[in-house]
Image: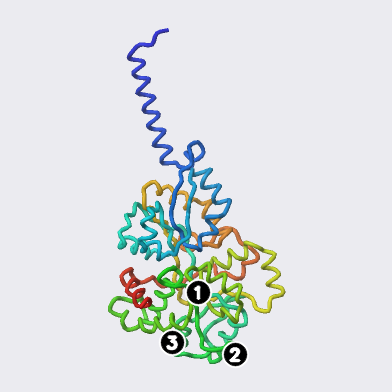
Amino acid sequence: MAISRRAFGIGLVAASAAATGGYVYLREHPEIAGRFGEAKRLFGFAGGEKEGFLANARVKSVLERRFGLILDGRRAGSVEMVREHALLDQKPQFLWPSSSVLVEVARSSGVKISRDQVIFNSPIVLYSWDRIAEGLVKGGIAQPAGGPRYTVDLSKLLKAIITGENWSSIGVADLFGRARVVSTDPNKSNSGFMFAGLAASLLSGDVVMPETLSKIDGDVATVFRRMGFKPPSSGKLFDDYVAGGPGAQPLIVGYENQLVEWVLQDAERWKRLEANAPAKPVILYPQPTVFSAHPLISVERQADELIEALTSESLLEMAWEDHGFRGPLGTIGKARNALLQSRLLERIDAVLPMPDAPVMLALLDRLAA
């Protein structure tokens, strides 16, 4: 049966409309496109603390099967990735640092941002050992918080470090030399960067401003000078802490999720340590602390889909269950692991905002001098 030209034309229009509608629908629903289309490959840099999350087989499977995304996420320091041209000149499609302040630093470095959004959070904490924490309690610097966890008056601790107090004078009798806390290099890694901002604000009595920075930047520099060697990444510092024990690494700065991730990697190892080790790792929550938000920066529009994927409920739960990252607003996930139940604070209310980007850049210059 012959088809009239008019009917044929209407059919073409309808097919075209259906194709256009289908394209728009798939574009707006990448989880559908991921099932049928070829996976999209995205290249970018991510902070070392997210290396385990990006290598997680479950995470990679969901990204590829549901969202059609394969990531080439290379490890880089959070501060370096938004400032160093050696990295930015590689044309990354996304950047995933560990502080919202670094979004503004990226803009000041000339990065053209399509979109940015915080994916998850982890508070800055101090890691120590049970007997050292108990000594700090005796010295009036730390307080028990129920279970093997503590809070710490960071302002008191910083002032003791600045004045050159020995460990014994702040309650820790069996450690040699002056009290110190070690962080990563603040000009390379975000945990050191955020600790520098937190220390500056505490020493100034409020969130540090341009007009108050010059009054306390020398004291902040003293805290960092007393650290000695500062590793370039949070992962390296945490590995040194676990391997070195209380004598080598009595007190370090890290992310809350690092101990969670380490425990979940090998539950039997953790149980052996809990039962037999002469010193056991503990978390001390600074009061106040700062939240390390992890914003995904989409440099090219095609990486916008990655934000949608990473904020899906399934991936946020994996971030918590397998790696200890809190979700939006600092909330913890649904799953509760018995090995960690008593070690984490469910709510963290004493939180300071980070100083503005220009203040932090000025502080970094002072610490690098």
Q: At 62% across and 67% down in the image, what residue appears?
A: 340
Position in image of residue 198 (x %, y %): 41, 75
The reply, left or right, for residue 31 in relation to residue 114 is: right
Find the residue positioned furthest to the front: 86
Q: Secondary structure at mark 1?
A: strand
Q: Identify the residue at image location x=58%, y=68%.
A: 259
CA distance separating discs 1 and 2: 21 Å
Give residue 173's mark.
2
Per the rendering, the mark at residue 253 is 1
Residue that label 3 marks: 162
Q: Position of residue 205 (x, y in %)?
A: 37, 81
In the image, what residue type sits under mark 1? Answer: Val
Q: Residue at x 48, y 51 (%)?
A: 72
Q: Name the image quarter holding the C terminus.
A: bottom left
User: Nearer the N terminus, badge 1 or badge 3?
Assistant: 3
In the image, residue 254 above or below residue 41: below
Determine whether the residue tagged by mark 2 lies in a helix, strand or loop: loop
Q: Quadrant of residue 244?
A: bottom right
N-term-proximal mark, 1 vs 2: 2
Q: Position of residue 176 (x, y in %)?
A: 57, 88
Q: Nearer the viewer, residue 306 or 204?
A: 306
- Mark pair 1, 3: CA separation: 17 Å
Task: Decide: is 233 above or below 284.
Answer: above
Question: Please, which residue is most extreme toward the left here?
Answer: 211
Q: Quadrant of residue 248?
A: bottom right
Q: Is residue 190 above or below residue 29?
A: below
In the image, taking residue 266 as reference, residue 326 lies left or right, namely: left
- The numbered mark, 2 or 3, whose residue comes first in the sequence reads 3
